[in-house]
């Protein structure tokens, strides 16, 4: 087996998690927390100034593409379709 190393990351919520990497690679300074999705930094990587950074949720990505008015209209159309199928 290739030489390996463990890297510990800590997210802004305080969750600690460990990842195993090959010893001969450049280790990523950040990794998404498996518990809360926020960005975790390794002990060798200084924490970013913006501690509120987190992974984008499905809702965040949806809101980048649609307005609330569009979503409300789409929901109304879909509910009407579903009720007419009965």
Image: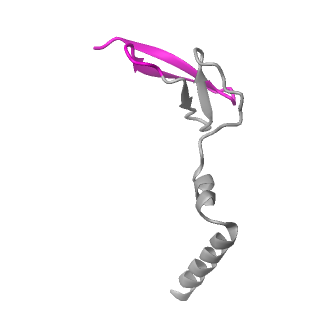
Q: Residue at x 37, y 14 (%)?
A: 24
Span shown in magenta: 1-27
Classify residue 45 as left or right of residue 7: right
Q: Residue at x 60, y 75 (%)?
A: 74
Q: Residue at x 64, y 77 (%)?
A: 73
Image vertical order of residue 12 relative to residue 83, above or below: above
Which residue is at the far top? 3
Front residue of 22/16: it is 22
Colour mapping used in the image: one colour
Tally of numbered discs: 0
Q: Is 6 within the magenta?
A: yes
Front residue of 38/18: it is 38
Image vertical order of residue 34 relative to residue 83, above or below: above
Image vertical order of residue 51 relative to residue 70, above or below: above
Relative image position of residue 56 (x, y in whole percent): 60, 46
Relative image position of residue 37 (x, y in whole percent): 59, 38
Q: In the rendered image, is residue 86 in sight? A: no
Q: In the rendered image, is residue 78 in sight? A: yes
Relative image position of residue 76 (x, y in whole percent): 63, 79
- Quadrant assignment for the N terminus: top left
Q: Quadrant of residue 34?
A: top right
Relative image position of residue 78 (x, y in whole percent): 57, 78
Q: Residue at x 57, y 32 (%)?
A: 33
Q: Is 58 within the magenta?
A: no
């Amino acid at each position: 087996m290739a030489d390996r190393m463990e890297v510990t990351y800590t997210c802004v919520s305080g969750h600690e998690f460990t990842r195993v990497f090959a010893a001969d690679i450049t280790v990523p300074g950040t990794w998404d927390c498996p518990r809360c999705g926020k960005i975790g930094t390794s002990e060798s990587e200084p924490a970013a100034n913006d501690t509120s950074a987190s992974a984008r949720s499905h809702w965040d990505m949806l809101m980048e593409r649609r307005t609330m008015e569009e979503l409300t209209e789409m929901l109304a159309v879909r509910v009407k379709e579903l009720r007419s199928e009965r």
